[in-house]
Image (cartoon, coloured by chain):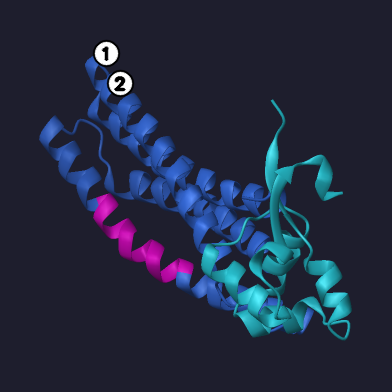
Amino acid sequence: MTYHEKRSVVHILSTIALTATYFPYVMNNYMTPGMNTEEILIFWSKAILVLIPVTIVVKIVIMILFSIFNAVATREELPKTDERDRLIELKASRNSQIAFGLGFVGALAAIALGNSVTIMFVFMIGAGVFSEVIDHLSQIYYYRSGV
Amino acid sequence: MAKHKINNEIRKLRFLTDEMTQEELADKVGVTRQTIMAIEKGKYSPSLELAFRISEVFEVPLNEVFTYGDTKSSK
């Protein structure tokens, strides 16, 4: 497995682990039963706004640790990024946007079908995680099969 | 309809240029060894700029490094 493939696997695992840890935590500690629609909107908005910097910091720390461990284990320098890497990132990003778009439509459909705002946000967050996973799975696929 | 792809003679040209390694070629043209490997295997078609840089390293015209034809002819 190349550096880029390993990095993508680490990204996928960290995204899933972070989401699976963060949302149950905030829902158990800050979501109270009987909240009205406005309070639920404020809750989810705050939860997502806090998640953004948390994700950035956690991912930076994880990638630094990964780079250190990988350098120690393989004794290889960090590979530089070239035109093939950029093309793969672009194609993976396109796939990721399609995946998020589908999730966004799913979230709107959930509301249109009469589900609660919480279900809509769960769909939106699920779409975010799904698109991130699709992004990195696409990168692994393109690195292995070619572009 | 026959499937077309870009074929290349990089492996042969490396061998004829003092058995240049993929790493050496990669350093000279400013990409990673993985990219040179992918080009040699036909898994990546380089940009025009990179193709020209590769042909400059081997000091041959571009059409002696890359050809466009049937998939079968690349083997």
Q: Is B17 within the magenta?
A: no
Asked if the residue at tag 1 contacts the one at tag 2, i.e. Cβ–Cβ closer than 8 Å, the answer is: yes
The residue at 45%/68% (across/down) is A58
Q: Position of residue B7 (x, y in %)?
A: 74, 53
Q: Which residue is mark 1?
A: A113
Left or right placement of residue B56 versus residue A121 in this view: right
The residue at 28%/48% (across/down) is A30
Instruction: For mark 2, name the chain.
Output: A
How many dots with numbers?
2
- Quarter-of-image position of residue A74: bottom right
Q: Position of residue B50 (x, y in %)?
A: 57, 70
Range covered by the magenta-colored residues: A47-59
Chain identifier for the blue-coloured part of the image: A
Q: Which residue is mark 2?
A: A110
Left or right placement of residue A29 versus residue B30 in this view: left
Give me the C-alpha separation between circle 2 and circle 1. 5 Å
- The hue of chain B in the figure is cyan
